[in-house]
């Protein structure tokens, strides 16, 4: 049986990916920062989601992510910012199953606001989780995969790993770091002759999860397109386990525009205020469509 480790498994995407991997026959180690703790946080700012929201049922811990998935899935504690903890989980999987086939770096946090206004603690946290967490997990997994000559790492990056993102500067910086590390590691694997190991980046636009479930206008960039569902991303990750690709942009039709903005920031910059106004409208529409009968979330 193939084995998989998933980080941030209690979150919106974590749950969907855990279920998809279990459905595909993986023995999944669904890991969470602390077991038994509710989730969802936009750092340094109040989060409008949580209680009473239709997303309430999506909130939960890594333990909840494996509920009903059978005895081959288990929950484990893993704070991704701690390299030795990542290594300990990788070691434990190999000690028990004899091999580690897949590691999915999914844990992530978001901080929003004008780049110069986000507080230092939030900046540090976003880099620690999104950038160093991804690096730690990748290194820990490859510690076993390289000697074994096979395996796969899938990193949940974001469109913010490809283009600059107004209102989410530190998040985009952290995701650019995750993207660069993903592809550089892939190139190093090929340079070292390790053809049986893949490292992949998944770059979704906004997904309907607690991460972006806020009415804060500073988070509007996540609403530049209709929201995806966690299950859609779960299926993308599932397909990648069959056919690895270095970078998967979801939805694919957004790729040309993202690449254009990345290549020509001078042309893109003047359009940012209008793009953000449109995104804010979508965000408000989303909020209205998910509000309860009293308008309370
Ligand atoms: N939702 C989107 O629009 C979107 C779009 C593109 C990419 N992504 C990426 O997809 C991934 C999953 O996001 P999501 O939308 O599912 O967010 P989410 O629902 O907020 O879940 C994020 C998960 O990461 C965990 N986490 C945070 N810090 C951690 C740490 N130090 N160690 C281990 N786990 C930690 C959280 O646990 P706690 O609650 O315990 O902190 C939570 O379970 C993230 O990397 C995100 O950047 C999301």
Image (tube, rainbow, N blue to C red):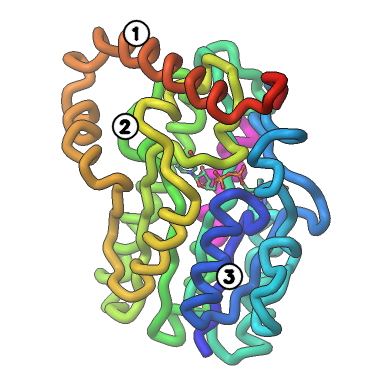
Point out which mark residue 163 bears. Answer: 2
Residue 162 quadrant: top left
Residue furthest toward the right? Answer: 36
Q: Is residue 133 visible to the viewer in this orientation of the structure?
A: no
Badge 1 marks a residue whose secondary structure is helix
Answer with mark 3 or mark 2, whichever residue precedes in sequence: 3
Q: Which residue is mark 3?
A: 5
Point out which mark residue 273 bears. Answer: 1
In front of the other: 271 or 25: 25
- Identify whether 117 is placed above or below 184: above
The quadrant of the rendering that contains the C terminus is top right
How far across and how far down the image is residue 4, in percent?
Answer: 54, 75
- The structure residue drawn at horizontal position 56% and vertical position 24%, both measured from the top left corner, is 287
Badge 3 marks a residue whose secondary structure is strand
- Identify whether 201 is placed above or below 67: above
How far across and how far down the image is residue 106, in percent?
Answer: 54, 54
In front of the other: 46 or 278: 278
The Cα atoms of the two marked residues, 2 and 1, are separated by: 16 Å
Residue 280 quadrant: top left
Q: Mark 2 and mark 3 in contact (Cβ < 8 Å)?
A: no
């Amino acid at each position: 049986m193939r084995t998989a480790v998933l980080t941030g498994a209690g979150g919106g995407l974590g749950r969907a990916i855990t279920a998809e991997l279990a459905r595909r026959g993986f023995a999944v180690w669904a890991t969470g920062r602390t077991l038994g703790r509710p989730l969802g946080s936009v750092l340094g700012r109040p989060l409008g989601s949580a209680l009473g929201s239709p997303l309430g049922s999506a909130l939960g811990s890594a333990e909840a992510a494996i509920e009903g998935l059978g005895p081959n899935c288990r929950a484990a504690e893993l704070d991704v910012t701690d390299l030795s903890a990542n290594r300990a989980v990788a070691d434990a999987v190999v000690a028990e199953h004899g091999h580690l086939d897949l590691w999915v770096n999914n844990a992530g946090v978001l901080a929003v606001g004008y780049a110069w206004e986000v507080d230092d603690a939030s900046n540090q946290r976003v880099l620690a989780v999104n950038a160093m967490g991804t690096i730690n997990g990748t290194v820990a997994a490859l510690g076993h995969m390289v000697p074994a000559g096979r395996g796969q790492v899938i990193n949940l990056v974001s469109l913010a790993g490809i283009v600059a993102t107004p209102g989410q500067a530190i998040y985009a910086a952290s995701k650019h770091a995750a993207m660069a590390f993903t592809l550089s590691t892939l190139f190093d694997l090929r340079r070292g002759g390790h053809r049986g190991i893949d490292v992949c980046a998944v770059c979704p636009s906004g997904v309907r999860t607690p991460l972006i479930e806020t009415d804060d206008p500073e988070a509007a960039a996540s609403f530049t397109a209709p929201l995806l569902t966690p299950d859609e991303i779960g299926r993308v990750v599932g397909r990648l386990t069959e056919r690895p690709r270095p970078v998967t942009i979801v939805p694919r039709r957004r790729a040309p525009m993202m690449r254009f903005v990345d290549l020509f920031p001078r042309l893109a910059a003047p359009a940012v205020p209008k793009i953000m106004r449109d995104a804010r409208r979508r965000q408000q529409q989303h909020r209205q469509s998910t509000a309860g009968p009293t308008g309370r979330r």
